[in-house]
Image: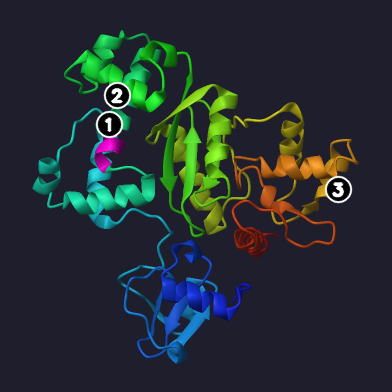
Amino acid sequence: MEVHALPPESVMLSAFLDGDASFDGVFVTAVRTTGIFCRPSCPARKPRRENVRFFGSPREALAAGYRPCRRCRPMEPVGRPPDWLGPLLRDVDADPTRRWSDADLRARGLAPERVRRWFRRHHGMTFHAYSRARRLGTALGSVKEGSDVTRAAYESGWDSLSGFQEAFRQWFGESPTAAAGRALISVDRIATPLGPMLVGATEEALCLLEFTDRRALEHQVRRVAVRLGAVYVPGRNALVARAADRLSEYFDGTRRTFDLPLAPAGTPFQGEVWDALRAIPYGQTRSYGEIAASIGRPRAVRAVGTANGGNALAIVIPCHRVVGADGKLVGYGGGLWRKRRLLELERAHGD
């Protein structure tokens, strides 16, 4: 059994008592008196300190004889939609032009307030705003394919052209005809054992893959859009779904390389660095100096570090495989604990 390095016990205890969701995936908490282990964010009543044990992963807690909590479900990837929401999400995907009301949700046995809270937490908007953005994205796709704006508006569920134009400008910041010349990036959140990730792809290439709590995530998202001349819409196209499948295989230890078309948003120098990162074998590491030397710029170590930090395609372009000159883990936007876990995963499943 592989044991992961953990934060100081005082930090884990504080995170657990505070229900700090940012530590979900870092450790699990087991309770001796109940035989149950939980995520740090579990809302259940907190046990007494002397009854608590910390483990680096659910696997370690299971091996010690504990069973998973039925309330916070620590065996599931962090960020996975709950079972009660699944049918609604599938129906939105099946028909993104449908207009939804609170009455529609109640007819399904769903409390609108509960749905709203989940969407605000995981998508930063209400369900109705999410649904409206999906409809706008569908309309923009129709305009890009040659449909006139009026037809696209009515086929996407708007009763009036003026209402559609106003909603479109509020979301995209420009008119449908102006936005029609831009690339359309579908974005969705996917669950992983290390926390949810934001995935973005056009119909042709993957251009965004970041942990949702990454430092400066908003800056990365804006930079990708500007570099690619693109606009974002929530939703899952075929390439987003394919990326989600490939990531699942990676975390299962059955995938070492990614056969995904990529559209990295960077300068020519950044592109050289990112190509060098993709050449690092699975389970191995290289220093910043070694990367600089491999692209013929041995003195550009600091610039290589900056380019590494600008990578917006985590894991697929494996910036987690770059370490300091002394071999220590440094500089990872998703957090050093994730960098450590990714390398542990690869070493455990390597040759």
In the visual, does 267 lie left or right of 28?
Answer: right
Residue 322 falls inside the magenta stretch = no
* Sequence order check, earlier mark of 1 and 3: 1
Residue 289: mark: 3
Give the residue type at disc 2: Ala
Is 72 placed above or below 331 here? below
Query: Residue 308: x and y, percent?
Result: 71, 43
Does residue 281 appear in this view? yes
Residue at 47% from the left image edge and 45% from the top image edge: 245
**Dot in front, 3 or 2:** 2
Q: Residues within 10 Å of mark 3 (few under 14, many from 20)?
A: many
The N terminus is located in which quarter?
bottom right
Q: Residues within 10 Å of mark 1 (few under 14, many from 20)?
A: many
Is 214 placed above or below 265 here? below
Give the residue type at disc 3: Gly
Q: What whole-number distance in Å separates the C-alpha atoms at marks 2 and 1?
A: 9 Å
Mark 1 lies on residue = 132
Residue at 63% from the left image edge and 73% from the top image edge: 5
Give the residue type at disc 1: Arg
Query: Residue 285: x and y, percent?
Result: 76, 54
Quadrant housing residue 172:
top left
* Sequence order check, earlier mark of 3 and 2: 2
Does residue 138 appear in this view? no
For the stretch drawn in magenta, what is the main secondary structure? helix
In the visual, does 71 lie left or right of 11?
Answer: left
Q: Which residues are magenta?
A: 127-131
Query: Residue 338: x and y, percent?
Result: 60, 59
Mark 2 lies on residue = 167
Q: Residues within 10 Å of mark 2 (few under 14, many from 20)?
A: some
**Circles 2 and 1: CB atoms closer than 8 Å:** yes
Q: What whole-number distance in Å separates the C-alpha atoms at marks 3 and 2?
A: 49 Å
